Image (cartoon, rainbow, N blue to C red):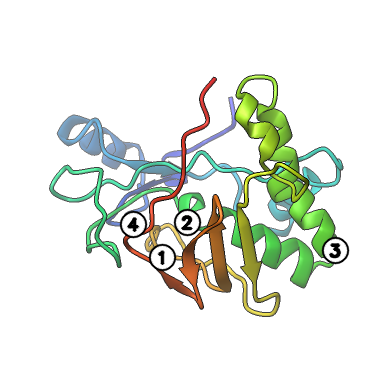
Amino acid sequence: MWGLEPHNLVLLPSGERIADAARLREVRAATPGALCLIEILDEADPADRAVLEGTFADPGTIVASDALPVSFDDGTRDTRQWPLPAGGATHPRTAGTFAKALRRFVRETGSWDWPEAFRRCSYLPARLLDAHAPAARRKGHLGVGADADIVVLDPDRVTDQATVLASTAPSHGVRHLLVNGEPVIRDGELLLDAYPGRALRS
């Protein structure tokens, strides 16, 4: 349907790009559940990049991530160790979505100013959940009665680091992060014993 070929598949965490149909058959026979990336758009291709960036021309387009779990070589998918142990793999959007959007659309292309970036990355995603999770109404804004979820960024440094082969590399440029009024990141350092978040339930 999308005109995909075997070379559009990249195995994780090895980074092997599937060379041809014969190699694809080998991988499917040996490890049918292998984690892989399906490359639909190539950001190095100007035409593909224009398609991707064109999707943000609509003022209602939000920035959000499904934040996939990190899978480790030993089969575990949960850890509180930081930095993350070696061998973890996920999709790079898990670690880089928001910082990439800020870098690309505010600093590099100038398509958004900072208030628009925060509207896209915080306010609109929360409004999408309002009807299904009532607690979301306290998210995405700094109004009276809102949850004190606050991020303080260095506008000149905020950027993503995650790639297909380094999918868990943390983003840079977050100076402080408060969740429910409690620090989770202070002076750029993650506080490992801070767990103030609460689930939003439908």
Report the residue marked by disc 4: 15
Of circles 1 and 4, the one toward us is 1
- Which one is in front, 4 or 169? 169
Q: Residues within 10 Å of mark 4 (few under 14, many from 20)?
A: some
5 relative to 58 in the view: left or right: left
Report which residue position mark 3 lands on. 113
Residue at point 86%, 42% (across, down): 59
Q: Residue furthest front?
A: 145
In what element is the residue under mark 4? loop
Quadrant in the picture for the N terminus: top right
Q: Exactly how many numbered labels are in the figure?
A: 4
Q: Nearer the viewer, residue 136 or 93?
A: 136
Q: Quadrant of residue 65?
A: top right
> In the rendered image of this protein, does residue 22 appear above or below residue 176?
above
Q: Which circle's residue, 3 or 2, is located before the other in the chain?
A: 2
* Labels 3 and 1: the sequence-earlier one: 3
Q: Single out the mark in the foreground, 3 or 1.
A: 3
Q: Earlier in the sequence, mark 1 or mark 2?
A: 2
Amino acid under disc 3: Asp
Q: Position of residue 177 (x, y in %)?
A: 55, 63
Q: Distance of mark 4 from mark 2, alpha carbons?
A: 17 Å
- Which mark, residue 169? 1
The CA span between labels 3 and 2 is 23 Å
User: Disc 1 versus disc 4: distance between alpha carbons?
Assistant: 15 Å
| Image-quadrant location for residue 76 | top left
Question: Which amino acid does the dot numbered 1 rest on?
Answer: Ala
Residue 158's x, y, as percent?
62, 72
Q: CA distance from mark 1 to mark 2?
A: 7 Å
Identify which amino acid the numbered label 2 is placed on: Ala
- Report crowding for label 3: few under 14, some 14 to 19, many 20 or more residues within 10 A (C-alpha): few
Tag 2 or tag 4, which sits nearer the N-term? 4
Upstream in sequence: badge 1 or badge 4: 4
